[in-house]
Image (tube, grey):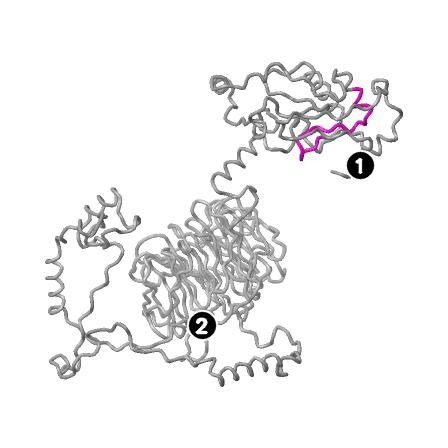
Amino acid sequence: MAAAILRRARSRRRRPPASPRRAHAGPAPPRARPAPSDPEGPAPRPTRSCRCRKWRRGSGLAWSMAGTRGVGREAAAAGSLPGKRPPEPEEAGTPSPRTEVASVRLEDEYVEDSSDEEDIRNTVGNVPLEWYDDFPHVGYDLDGRRIYKPLRTPDELDQFLDKMDNPDYWRTVRDRMTGHSVQLTDEQVALVRRLQRGQFGDVSFNPYEPAVDFFSGDLMIHPVTNRPADKRSFIPSLVEKEKVSRMVHAIKMGWIQPRRPRDATPSFYDLWAHEDPGAVLGRHKMHVPAPKLALPGHAESYNPPPEYLPGEEERMACERREPEERRLNFLPRRFPSLRAVPAYGRFIQERFERCLDLYLCPRQRKMRVNVDPEDLIPRLPRPRDLQPFPTCQALVYRGHGDLVRCLSVSPGGQWLASGSDDGSVRLWEVASARCVRTVPVGGVVKSVAWNPRPTVCLVAVAVEDAVLLLNPALGDRLVVGSTDQLLSAFTPPAEPAAQPAHWLEASEEERRVGLRLRICHGKPVTQATWHGRGDYMAVVLATPGRSQVLIHQLSRRRSQSPFRRGHGQVQRVAFHPVRPFLLVASQRSVRLYHLLRQELTKKLTPNCKWVSSLAVHPAGDNVICGSYDSKLVWFDLDLSTRPYRVLRHHKKALRAVAFHPRYPLFASGSDDGSVIVCHGMVYNDLLQNPLLVPVKVLKGHSLTKDLGVLDVAFHPTQPWVFSAGADGTLRLFT
């Protein structure tokens, strides 16, 4: 601000001579002395060096720096004689006409001024306004004359009329420094409300930002600094030597007496701590002393603290409860003194119950095991030692118009197939998230499964009551051609046998889209999954009875129902990766069938209300199940039919679980919109239990219709995981 004033003063020095209005009007008038009762003292003398007119806040007086000549001329024009006090007004509340003329002239002069450093309406300065409570004026103008208060201040009636007429009266405040009414803006009103609620003034400020852990909790073996020790650290101090010699001399002279040992005898002791061993109770070696009563607390005081006194609602709620459900057998009350406390009404009843507890309730001595609580916590490795695993979102596949129910990855990991409720199957390139092809199927896609054989390019799509076999014509042309040759090499038998499903060839228009075969079942299909060799396919039908699960053979185009009777509603099926087993998950159990022997091998009980998903470990000895009650159950088939571990990391229902074919990873997707990746190491040593450690929570999908992640699948070669969500997107986490 000082620099701006100096620059303006220098610029005005270079201007041409003053106008005739500021001609020399004689010598400068002497300084006018203020009245003895003025709180501010004499007005300052105008200076010649600075010609810019500014307000000085510290003194409360208006300075006129236009030079002595300008001041003299203005004083002469205003009618004030040099060396005399300006005339007092007749009335305290009526401003003089000279003051009004001067104020108008000052206001015009400040209109011409371009200074924006101070408020032009402030004619008082930065002084307490309480100084002018007993005076008729509120400050001084540029000529040192008083500026008187207005004749009439708005009373309560004016304020009431203004409140009724002005719709913005509630946001209008009065500025005490300028005397004007200021209307607050929406931003200022919002700021005031935030401050009233105890919030921060800045809207963008977040008081709950996550704390940054600058220091790790690991114990380091290397020192922070390797500075060599100082010389004074191993050389005896002469000052300490003098202190010790003085203390030794004081002990020899008897000036310092040794401390007397304190008496270790306690002032109070337990009367029954050391009982006589020759007494009757001492003969019983297994005698257990009776438990002692709990000491009274603040609630039992005759003058309890206010927080212990119940209110009227708490008193009525306590009276409505049963006696055994009450936290206390009495209601705390306050009495003026101990003499005013009445007799306790339940004294005899409580003493009788105490006697019953002493001789009717048996007591038994139990040996307490001293175990360190830290030893009970399992020693889990750190997540960074279990890498690689997906940690962040890499790509988002957008294009579906409705929720995406299922997805599947090609055996080579280059292509991705997804099915949605918009009635289409989309084929994506994994590396670029580009939709290569869209196949309309005319219905809701419930399941998509890519054939696991790398020499066959075939995708099974479950739509309504049929399973469509598509040749997407992606990748190697030789593989695409061999797939068509494999399907066209079939010769139907002379006498077709009765089958639970019908195999239909695709028409010419359907073949252009990529459809090769259609397997019709007559009932809605919920899942389709391939065997590891790629020739057999299992299908789950949404119908009660024994024909809920069908197995199709692609090479011979045969279908069969492997079960004679049903065991509840089938949710999921999966082939064993190594052995000829078929796992069938119903609502409450998982059954393991031997396909060659055609018998039930095991029945797993996951202790869940409703099983929703199923996955088998690549080695075949472990199985995981997801349920709608937000549980993930791990089974060790060699250990037991009971769950080895139950994980409750999700907050809502689980929709899909999956194992990685190469890495020790498994993932689960839930309706809470998250995918949890866990490290699941299975050892070849049967004596060592599997290691299950959750390593990462992946979020990115938004909840739609209370649905989150509907399907998850791992990349066949990389530690990547794909997820399909109800928001119509697929996401790749790497």
Q: Is residue 412 visible?
A: yes
Which of 324 and 475 lies nearest the eye of the viewer?
A: 324
Q: Is residue 479 magenta?
A: no
Kind of element beneath mark 1: helix
Give the labeled residue for mark 1. 6
Residue 652, numbered label: none
Chief SS of the magenta region: loop
Q: At 43% across and 81% down in the image, what residue appears?
A: 258
Q: Give the label, 2 or 1, closer to the camera.
A: 1
Q: Label 1 amino acid?
A: Leu
Query: Of callouts 2 and 1, which one flags the residue occurring earlier in the amino acid sequence?
Result: 1
> In the image, residue 180 lies at what x, y percent?
59, 24
Residue 62 covered by magenta stretch: yes
Assess disc 2: are there few (<14), some (14-19) or many (≥20) residues with their C-alpha within 10 Å of its C-alpha.
Answer: some
Which residue position holds label 2?
691
Report helix, strand or loop for mark 2: strand
Magenta segment, which residues?
55-73
Frontmost residue, 221 versus 403: 221
Q: Is residue 719 above or below residue 545?
A: below
Amino acid beneath label 2 = Leu
Q: Tell me the crowding category of disc 1: few under 14, some 14 to 19, or many 20 or more residues within 10 angstroms, Cα based.
A: some
Quadrant containing the C terminus is: bottom right
Task: State left or right for residue 647 relative to residue 427.
Answer: left
Residue drawn at x 49%, y 48% as measured from the top left = 702
